[in-house]
Image: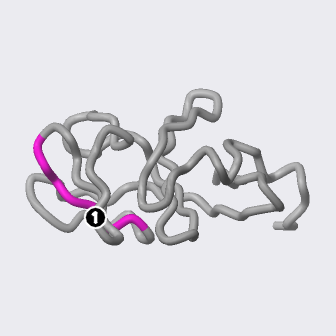
Amino acid sequence: MSDDVKEWREVAKVADVPENDVIQVQLGETCIALFNLDGRHYATSGICTHAHALLAQGYVQDDTIECPLHQGVFHIPTGRAMAAPVTKDLQTYEVKVDGERILIRLP
């Protein structure tokens, strides 16, 4: 698959995502959690796989996000479920920064 501009969608500006924090963005019907970890940007599904809580309301620590509802923990770069009660990994998305724009490629 080619890496052309049409496949990437702008979701935010770099300044919109505070360092070591998360914001929620929406691409059509898809809720996405957009992270800035020490200047590196990551995107995962914005909904916890356990109980449908919004991860943008969760707690970022190092490279993990803790769900605000039942404190399940996910590894942000990989989406891997790390601590009960979560057992199902998060969907992750490719992210690239183009100048001040943050772009995501949906599968």
Residue behind mark 1: 61
Residue occupying the point 11% across, 43% down: 70
Q: Is residue 29 left or right of residue 77?
A: right
Indicate left or right for 13 with 29 as reference. Answer: right
**Residue shown at the point (27%, 34%) measured from the top left:** 53
For the residue pair 61 and 104, the one nearer the viewer reads as 61
Residue 76 drawn at (x, y percent)? 39, 64
Q: Is residue 71 magenta?
A: yes
Q: Which residue is situated farthest in the top direction here?
A: 29
Rendered image quadrant of residue 52: top left
- SS at badge 1: strand
Give the residues in magenta.
70-76
Please state the horizontal and vertical placement of residue 35, each as a whole percent of the image: 49, 56
Q: Amino acid at mark 1?
A: Gln
Please tell me whether residue 22 is drawn above or below residue 60 in the rendered image: above
In magenta segment, residue 33: no
